Amino acid sequence: MAEIKERPDSALAAALDPIVDAALSEGRVAGAVLLVAKDGELAYARAAGHADLETGRPMQRDAIFRASSLTKPLVTAAVLALVEAGVVGLDDPVIRYLPEFQPRWQGEPLTITLRHLITHTAGLSYGFMQPVDGPYLQLGVSDGMDQPGLGFPEELKRITEAGLFFPPGVAWLYSVGMDVLGAAVEQATGKSLPEVVRERVTDKLGLADTGFSVSDKARLARPYADGPPPQPMGATHTVPFAELSGIKFAPDRIFTPGSFPSGGAGMVCSAPDFLTFLEAIRTGGGGVVGPETASAMMTNQTGSHAIVTSGPGWGFGFGGAVMLDPAASGSPLPAGAWMWGGVYGHSWFVDPAGGKSVVLMTNTSTEGMSGRLSQEVFAAAAAG
């Protein structure tokens, strides 16, 4: 895909620069990269703050970040490319590829499809969305960012033992479904998930800094937890989340052999790479998927199910939430916007009708995902 040309928008800079400056001066983030594309051109681009506070290394536009849930739309696109190629079908039962994966609902195994996994309607969950005595925590289910060295067989066994939280298809719950999907893809293709994503997505778009391994450790941003000031993460770190068990991080998991490639949270990427990906989907798929599939990714796929992490007014497409009713949501984003984030400190949205894509990547959890910075950036970028 051709490099996005720059056409700076001074009005947008006047709106966004003070927001970024305040987040840095108030110690809400260590560093950030913010990119806004309008009608296929880069209208705003800024790297600010530090990639590593302790060494004084400044943030650069091509910094590499642990992607957390920015992994999901990338893996989603790879899976949908497999669907287009006839390798798998969205309505295939998961047991076709993972015969032992049969978590139960009230003692009975029920049919889970790839569609259920990719839309978070399978009846699975995440450990960080449960209280400390929740079944995923008790059984040691990984959220895909912790437990270095844990492989697919044991992870799938633990998820199976935990059972279902509801019958597949009857509700929406953010979950490890993308991790299960990744395991199914490996069985369906005979290739590793990293190979599939590279062949189907990143190589086609020239995303050299996006993958399940780090292309250049010198450009990898150090991860921090919310302060102020931002607190450097150690080998393990738990960030509080609502009144639940907290989000568990092991930042060097990606370097640990044997860690399953998490389809929900296991990749790294740079902001320019991710913007290129979003623009590819916005403009019809970029050769990764066809125009009809690209449109489907940005269209609600979950009916009237409540998207519990986003609140009222939202649906869920393939890879991200879809704005259905701005008034009900109280969000500044327009109807039809497609968005999501990542708990390492990232957020993004695409406004298909307005021709706009926005990527905010920070190295501070969770301010860059759901704090004041991301909220103010979304409002200013949507208005601009």
Image (cartoon, helix red, strand yellow):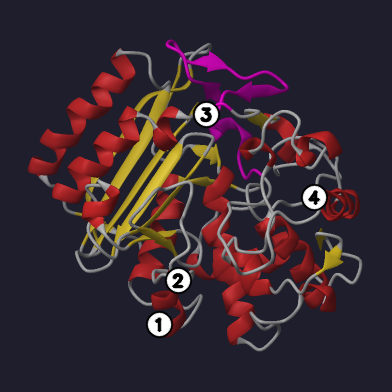
Gap between marks 3 and 4, in whole Å? 27 Å
Look at the picture and state if 233 lies above or below 255: above
Gap between marks 4 and 1, in whole Å? 31 Å
Does label 2 or label 1 sit earlier along the sequence? 1
Q: Which amino acid does label 3 sit on?
A: Ala
Q: Which amino acid does label 1 sit on?
A: Pro
Answer whether labels 4 and 1 touch (C-beta < 8 Å): no
Work out whether residue 209 can be spotted.
Answer: no
Q: Which amino acid does label 4 sit on?
A: Phe
Q: Mark 4 points at which residue?
A: 260
Callout in the foreground (3, 4): 3
Does label 2 or label 4 sit earlier along the sequence? 4
Q: Position of residue 166 (x, y in %)?
A: 68, 59
Q: Mark 2 points at which residue?
A: 303
Q: What residue type is labelled 2?
A: Gly
Q: What element carries label 4?
A: loop
Q: Is residue 378 left or right of residue 322?
A: left
Q: Is residue 79 left or right of residue 313?
A: right
Gap between marks 2 and 4, in whole Å? 32 Å
Q: Which residue is drawn at 74% across and 60% down?
A: 180
Residue 228 belongs to magenta span: yes
Does label 4 or label 1 sit earlier along the sequence? 4
